[in-house]
Each structure stands twice: as structure tokens, then as C-alpha cells.
Amino acid sequence: MDANSFVFGVDLDGVCGDYTAAFRTIVADELGVSEESLTLERSWDFREWGLDAEGFERLHRLAVVERNLFRDMPAIDGVSDALWRLSDAGVWIRVITHRLYVNWGHETAIADTVSWLDRHRIPYRDLCFLGAKPEVQADAYIDDGPHNIIGLRKAGNTVITFDQPYNRDIEGLRAASWTEVEDIVLGLAAEGGHGVQVQLPGIDAGADRLDRQRDA
């Protein structure tokens, strides 16, 4: 890694992947209710779905280990193309996720995470599985979890809050789409004196570049 590289720490669930939508499908099936009865405007602890801590942990474990939640969740709109443009501009993408939450499910979680990243053409230089995100060196982070955002900022880090219903009481830097994320990150990199290069016209770009080259 170049010493002048801008390192961007990227969370996955709720930022790159639509965890709520994927988990809702599984929870509705397991509880025998309609998906529409489980609101998308939910709190961090899913209390609107009638889940307590024990119920969430049971369903989350089932979703990860038996239903391959981390492999099959949909991607957030625009994430792949935005990250490719940032990577092309010289931003170092460091994926940071706390997906080893489920005991005895680590093999599935790691394998499904890598499969998901490849399937959705997410570019990254590093992939970190850990809960203490302030321990990971990055110039800026993006996260949706209120506790992560607060913890990172208390440690003196720059954090973009990726807009979700459960984090709207948190003030500060915020993005509601990956287009907004891209603009903020490029601005932060430029302000910090990091070398960034916006994609030039005519240069092969886009998340599907590898597929196009293969099929050419």
C-alpha cells in the first residue's frame, strides 16, 4: 500500500448489503407471518418485530448457518460501481465486518461473505473480521451501527453514517446513497492531501469490467 493511500473502512451489513430485507424474509418464513407485517422502519434491536434478545440471536444464527443469509442478501443500490470508482481513484478499500458473531458458524460466515463480495463485484484490498473497529487503521469509515459510529468517533475517527431508520438520531457526517458516499470520500481524500484520480473518459470502468473482458 502506498503511504499516501486513503484507507476507507467499509462495513457490510446495512451499508453494502441489505441485511434488513434479507433477514425479514427469513424471519417471516420462520415465524409464519407475512413480510409486510415486519416493518422496514425498525429499531436496532428489532423490537417492532416482536423479537427479544434471545429471539433475535436464535433467528440470526439460523439465518447465517442454515439459510445462508450472508451469501444471499441483496446488495445496496449502487455500492459496487461506487466502490470501483473509488478504488480506481486510488482509495484503498478495507472491508471491516463483525460477522463472526455466531459460535460454530465461522466457516459458513467467512465463506458466504467472500462468495457475496465476489458475486456482487465488490472491490477490496483487505477483509477484516472483528468487532473492535477502532483497532483497524483507516482514514475514514462508513457504518450504520449506532454503537460502532459512536465508538469510532470517540476514538477520534472520521465516520460517515450510512442512513438507516435506527441511526437517524446520530448527528454528523451522513450519506443516504452510495453516490453521496463517493462524493464525501473523494472530498475527504482531497482535503487530507491524498492523491486521488477521478476516472477519465474512455477508460474501462464499472463493476462488470471483468465479465466484459472475459466475454470479449
Image (cartoon, grey):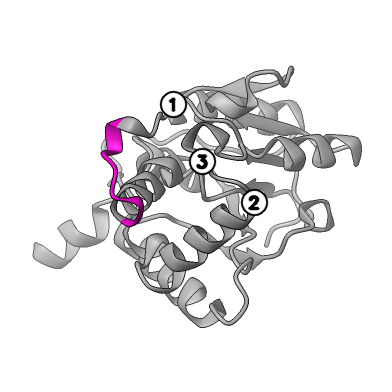
Q: Residues within 10 Å of mark 1 (few under 14, many from 20)?
A: some
Q: Which mark is residue 53?
A: 2
Does the magenta-highlighted stretch encompass residue 34? Answer: yes
Which residue is nearer to you in this view: 41 or 191?
Answer: 41
The residue depicted at 61 percent of the width and 46 percent of the height is: 52
What amino acid type is highlighted by mark number 2? Ala
Residue 114 vs residue 6: left or right? left
Q: Which mark is residue 15?
A: 3
The residue depicted at 59 percent of the width and 48 percent of the height is: 11
Quarter of the picture containing the C terminus is bottom left
According to the image, label 1 marks what residue? 179
Q: Which range is magenta?
A: 30-36
Q: Where residue 210 sits in the image (x, y, percent)? A: 25, 61
Distance Cα–Cα, label 1 vs label 3: 13 Å
Q: Where residue 68 sits in the image (x, y, percent)? A: 37, 67
What amino acid type is highlighted by mark number 1? Thr
Distance Cα–Cα, label 1 vs label 2: 34 Å
Q: Earlier in the sequence, mark 1 or mark 2?
A: 2
* Mark closer to the observer (1, 2): 2
The residue depicted at 76 percent of the width and 53 percent of the height is: 133
Q: Which structural element holds mark 1?
A: helix
Q: Which structural element holds mark 2?
A: helix
